[in-house]
Amino acid sequence: MISPATDGITCFPLSVDVATEVIVKISPPNCAATLPAELRSPSELRSAALFWLAESDAVRKAEGVRLLAQAWTSGAIELDMHAALAARRPIPGKPDKPELVSPLSVRRRSMITPEGRAILIHALAHIEFNAINLALDAVWRFAGLPREYYADWLQVADEEALHFSLLTGHLRDQGYAYGDFPAHNSLWEMAEKTRQDILARIALVPRTMEARGLDATPPVRAKLAQAGDMAAAAILDIILRDEIGHVAIGNRWYNWLCKQRGLDPVASYARLAAEYQAPVMRGPFNLEARRAAGFSELELAALPTQFK
Ligand SMILES: [Fe+2]
Ligand SMILES: [Fe+2]
């Protein structure tokens, strides 16, 4: 067991089995000796989410989030739903690389070359890095919500950390690393725009940006499989399965908030999308995945013409 620290920051009480599993699955082998010191964080969930959001080391952030989720499941983490928290370090914490550039200057990738496929995997890893940050932000930023809300977004953060680890592990197998190529930041920019209103955040991040991932993943998976990268295709299968769950969580809390505020979900979405300049929705849409994620038939029918 790892013993508690004495500076107000607590190490999660990990069993040897859990620590071993983490080392095997998501840490390079030489992390074993430093695991306890690296993975200290507050023992209250929302404070811990803010702590890991501010972490700039991408690998440590992913490891810390996975351990936080395990500690939460084991009952070792408290929850203060009402605390007014403030970030004391810059958020989101991010490494010096990848260099962030305009979406227009991110290189197009050819599936024919190993480097082209690495650029694609890198872009997906960067999306997952941002997705970890977005889920952590949903946990710490918005106070006064039900316990299940925080548990849901912690689960999302945990799965995003898994996706990031799988993709960066695959990159490593190809001789590349996260940070080797430039990336764009549009996912986090939408988080910035919607930081004042949880309804807008959920409408436009999980129900718009993440839902676009449901549409985009099958064709990308097919391209990778066609190029013979079956390992990457298998990772995308995991991601698509989990992302349906993330969008479902978005739909759950969006509809809950609409009900609380006496708002019509469909009309409110159109209003928020216009107000916050959501990206234009373009098909083809993965209606099966969107349906599985809980979009209503009314919402699905509205998709192709929603922003015309
Ligand atoms: Fe993800
Ligand atoms: Fe996600």
Image: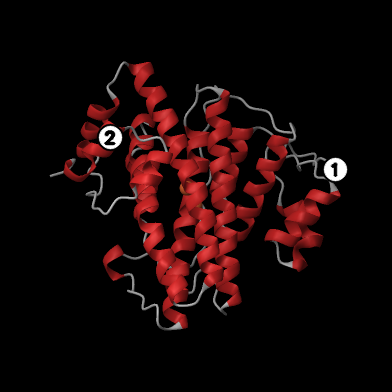
Q: Residue at x 49, y 62 (%)?
A: 125
Task: Give the residue at mark 2.
Answer: 299
Q: Which mark is residue 174?
A: none
Secondary element type, mark 2: helix
State which mark lies toward you, 1 or 2: 2
In the image, 105 versus 280, the foreground residue is 280
Task: Give the residue at mark 1.
Answer: 3
Q: Residue at x 44, y 64 (%)?
A: 221
x, y percentage for residue 270?
22, 34
x, y percentage for residue 117?
44, 75
Q: Residues within 10 Å of mark 2 (few under 14, many from 20)?
A: some
x, y percentage for residue 27?
70, 62
Residue type of the residue flagged with mark 2: Glu
Q: Residue at x 79, y 52 (%)?
A: 19
Q: Is residue 17 left or right of residue 165?
A: right
Quarter that holds the N terminus:
top right
Q: Residues within 10 Å of mark 1 (few under 14, many from 20)?
A: few
Q: Is residue 153 left or right of residue 302?
A: right
Q: Is residue 91 at all visible to an observer of this figure?
A: no
Q: Is residue 77 at all visible to an observer of this figure?
A: yes
Q: Is residue 250 left or right of residue 93?
A: left
Quarter that holds the C terminus:
top left
